[in-house]
Amino acid sequence: MFTRSRLLLLLTVALVAGVGWGAFLWVYARVEVEPDTFLVVTNRWGEALPDGELVSPDATYKGIQRRVLPEGRHFLNPLFHSYERHPVVRVPEKFCAVLTRKSGVELPADRKARGEFLARGAIDLEATETPGERGVVEPVLGPGKYRLNPHVYHVEIVPAVEIESQQVGVKVLLWGKDAPAGRASPYVVADGERGVQRSYVPGGTHYLNPYVTRIAPVDVRAHTVVFEDIEFPSKDGFTIQPRVQVRYRVVPEKAPELFVLLAEDGVLYQKDDTPDDQQRNPILQKVILPLIRGYVRIEGSKHDAREYISNPKAEAAPGAKATNPRERLQEELMAKVKPECEKLGIVIDSIAVGQTRMNDTLDELAAQIREREQARIARSTNQQKVVQFEQEQELKSTEALAQRARQMIEANTKLERAKVDAERQVGNLKAQLEAELAAAQARLDGSRKKAEAVLTAGKATAAVEVAKNEAEVAGLRTAIDGFGSADAFAQYHVLLKLSPVLSEIFAADDGEFAKLFSNYLAARNGAPPVAPAPRIKPIAGGAGGN
């Protein structure tokens, strides 16, 4: 039985052992893995590796382990494990990683005999067991960071395939089943079969395994090229060298077949900016240019040289349709060359035949044509002058007649206007005279009425005055008769007029009349006499005058 002391001893030993083990792990077994790095672990103990294997199939085997340890803190007993530090594999943008598996199942002999060397099995970076067969792995890894065990995978960074917006890609499958013998096209195969695929690849970025699939870009935009080295004999034996301009483009659906026919070393050269580029361009040198040269010799030799030098539109009669051999030639070229090119996947948008380059013989011919043209222009100018003179004469005659007609119209207009003015003046004068006559008649009638009124008023006034006078005379006669005589009546009226004045005179103490008696009154009272006041003349028209 355990005693208490033994139990304490065991606990102490266990505690010391635990602390010592922890210190051992922390000091010797602790491994710090920095960011963007990983560890490849190797087991020091375990079962022996199978023949031909370099990596342990699982954790029970001795040797390099397939699974790697990511960044962070790990504890590895140095007695049982060793490790290697490796940086992560960085795949930049527009690139991809092609993997070759170094360990795994050996490819079967029958597949090797058929030429199949692609390893089967997915890319599983966390797998602890054998993930697949040895060899090139078909899938690729896109841009990013990967912890790839360098003892398991060989990594090759390859650029991605860029197909621009004005391009299509021709896909070539390097591995796959063979195409059947009776396929529709001898140049392309169905999708999935080994060879050039029938379908084209659209524009974009494609991450492909170059050991499995290749994509070649083909430009499908429109190109314009000018040929300077085309020549043909004219009908009359002159050498004609026109400038021929062609605008063409590749049909996207026919790009794979065209690539097979014209590509060299897996590249279809399509530049045409310089003469050297045109010489290297197989589309121009093997398709377009031979067709144009052939048909331009056939069709261009049907016309004389002067037709290519002169201006048929100028020589054509007025109203007639111009016959330009260059226009007819380019129409014939479009009709013959375009269908042939479309069979191969090339569309001809336009063909333009330009001005002919001159040489000594053509210069002489051009000089003759110019002289003839100048004579024709002079004749045409003279004809135009004759027509112009006739038109001017006719115009002047028309202007004279028109001027005469205008003068007649102006004279008739003035005559009519004078008649209208005279009639208007006669009418106005007649109306004015009638108005004045009516006004005079009205004034005469008024004067008569006024005279009659005045006469009537005078007669009435005279009758009133007569009656008034008769009444006054009758009253005077009656008054006189009452006084007895006219003198008595007159005296009465005089006294009647003087009575108010006499009353005033005698009634006032300071009046003139009172002053006559003031001297007498003063003498009586012992006062000196007062001089008499001067005599006051009576006011004209006053009562004294009456």
Image (cartoon, rainbow, N blue to C red):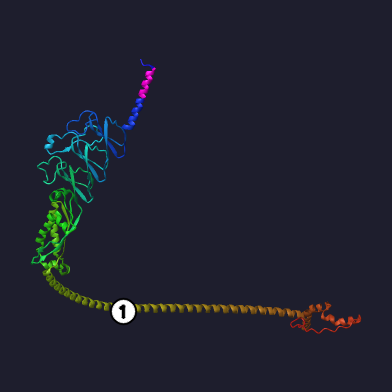
Q: Quadrant of residue 474?
A: bottom right
Camera-side residue of 20 and 93: 20
Camera-side residue of 56 and 245: 56
Which residue occupies 38% across, 20% down? 8
Dot 1 falls on a residue whose secondary structure is helix
Q: Is residue 384 left or right of residue 361?
A: right
Give the residue number, with chain letter if any, for mark 1. Answer: 407
Relative to residue 108, is residue 325 depicted above or below? below
**What's the magenta bit mostly, secondary-structure-wise?**
helix
Camera-side residue of 545 and 57: 57
**In the rendered structure, does residue 456 fall within the stretch colored magenta?**
no
Residue 169: x and y, percent? 19, 47
Q: Is residue 44 left or right of residue 342?
A: right
Residue 384: x and y, percent? 19, 74
Relative to residue 489, is residue 134 depicted above or below? above
* Magenta span of residues: 4-15
Image quadrant holding the N terminus, namely top left
Q: Is residue 60 left or right of residue 32?
A: left
Residue 215: x and y, percent? 19, 46
**In the rendered structure, does residue 14 fall within the stretch colored magenta?**
yes
